Image (cartoon, rainbow, N blue to C red):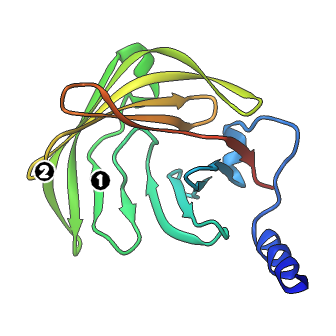
Amino acid sequence: MRLQSCLACAALMAWPALAVGQCPTATDLQTGVRLSTDTPHFSALYSMLPNGHLQVQRLNEGGATIMTTSTPHPLTKISSTTNAPSFVTTSTDDIDHLDEVLQWSSSVENMVGGTRIPSGTVNVTFLDHSDVTIADCTHDTWRVEVTNAPRLLPQTTSVNHYAPTLGLIIAIQIMDDTGRMASALTFDRIEAVQ
């Protein structure tokens, strides 16, 4: 029993300290914001890189990183992934004003050995504003439809809830071929990391 207690303490000490009592904002991305679910377990730590890209670290139940990605903007295609090919969007113009311009699109390129290979398009459409509540925190979000159209793979569509004051997507609904929701990811906790 004592060994289990020591292991649990060690696992907790490996996680960064969490800010208590307030809802995270985009400023907290400097040190990190963690979004997590209980069942099934999902945890991700979001932080801002020096180049302005958002880094996402997928964490296992013990808090260890199992995958890292980064993107120039949460609504764009992932730009790099550890141990996998990198995908880049060719533009991020106007995406911060999606609620005004209503649509944004970009070609997507696959980075293979330093060579850019055209691989499809990503289209983002502003649908409306929607409140999303995680624990005690309610965020105004842009509900947006994201359509990825790879050249050699089937098209995928999701409806994402992007919180501009937080700079993160905080809920996702994956749509099937008929436009109905096939699965969803909603979070149980949102925490600023100190």
Disc 2: which residue: 153
Residue at the spot x=22%, y=75% of the render? Answer: 113
Looking at this view, name the residue that lies furthest to the bottom: 3
Residue at the spot x=36%, y=38% of the render? Answer: 92
Q: Residues within 10 Å of mark 2 (few under 14, many from 20)?
A: few
Kind of element beneath mark 2: loop
Q: Give the x, y percent position of residue 144.
A: 39, 25
Disc 1: which residue: 88
Question: Looking at numbered disc 2 in the image, what kind of residue is underneath it?
Answer: Leu
Looking at this view, name the residue that lies furthest to the right: 2
Residue at the spot x=19%, y=26% of the render? Answer: 178
Q: Give the x, y percent position of residue 7.
A: 80, 80
Q: Give the x, y percent position of residue 46.
A: 60, 52
Question: Looking at numbered disc 1 in the image, what kind of residue is underneath it?
Answer: Val
Tell me the tag on residue 104: none
Q: CA distance from mark 2 to mark 1?
A: 17 Å
